[in-house]
Amino acid sequence: QVQLVESGGGLVQAGGSLRLSCAASGRTFRNYPMGWFRQAPGKEREFVAAISWSGWTGYSTYYADSVKGRFTISGDIAKNTVYLQMNSLNAEDTDVYYCASTKVVGSDPSRYRYWGQGTQVTVAS
C-alpha cells in the first residue's frame, strides 16, 4: 500500500520561507517520479514542481513558471522523502500543498495515482 505523508506547512510572513516534506512508503521515489501540487478552495489543482531520478543522469527537476527561481524540489533516496523548499513566499502562494506519485513525470495531476493528505501553507501579507 502506497502512502504519502506531507509535513512542514504553516503560517509565514510574506518574503519568508518554508520547507515541505513528503515521506513515501510502499513505493520508492527512485523508481516513481514525485510531484508537488497546490490547490485553493474552488480552484483546480495546480502543478508546482516535480522530480524524477535516473541512475545515469541523477535528478531531473521541473517547475511551474510561477515558482521558478523561488522553489526548489529535492529528494533523499535513503529516506524515500521529497522536499519542497519555498523561498520568497507571497500571498498568492497560500494554498493546500499536496505531494503525489506517478509513473511518468509531468504537470498533469491526472497522471498521478497516489496523493498525500495535503498540508496548508498560509502566507500573511
Image (cartoon, rainbow, N blue to C red):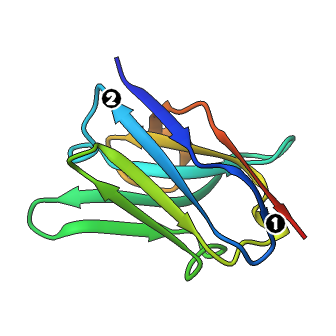
Q: Earlier in the sequence, mark 2 or mark 1?
A: 2
Is 96 placed above or below 59 here? above
Q: Position of residue 124 (x, y in %)?
A: 87, 64
The residues tagged by marks 2 and 1 sit, at their Cα atoms, a distance apart of 31 Å
State which quadrant residue 103 falls in. top left
x%, y% of residue 91?
84, 67
Q: Residue at x 45, y 32 (%)?
A: 4
Residue 92 numbered tag:
1
Would you place residue 119 above or below residue 117 in this image? below
Residue 108: give x, y in percent of width and height.
Answer: 53, 50
Residue 27 percent location from the top left of the image: 28, 31
Q: Which mark is residue 84?
A: none
Estimate how packed mark 1 is, as few (under 14), some (14 to 19) or many (20 or more) residues with alpha carbons within 10 Å.
few
Is disc 2 placed on a helix, strand or loop?
Answer: strand
Q: Amino acid at mark 2?
A: Ser
Q: Residue furthest bottom?
A: 69
In the rendered image, which quarter contains the C terminus?
bottom right
Are the two marked residues, 2 and 1, in contact with CB atoms closer than 8 angstroms?
A: no
Identify which amino acid the numbered label 1 is placed on.
Glu
Give SS at disc 1.
helix
Q: Which sits in the foreground, 46 or 122?
A: 122
Question: Which residue in the structure is indicated by mark 2?
Answer: 25
Q: Residue at x 48, y 41 (%)?
A: 100
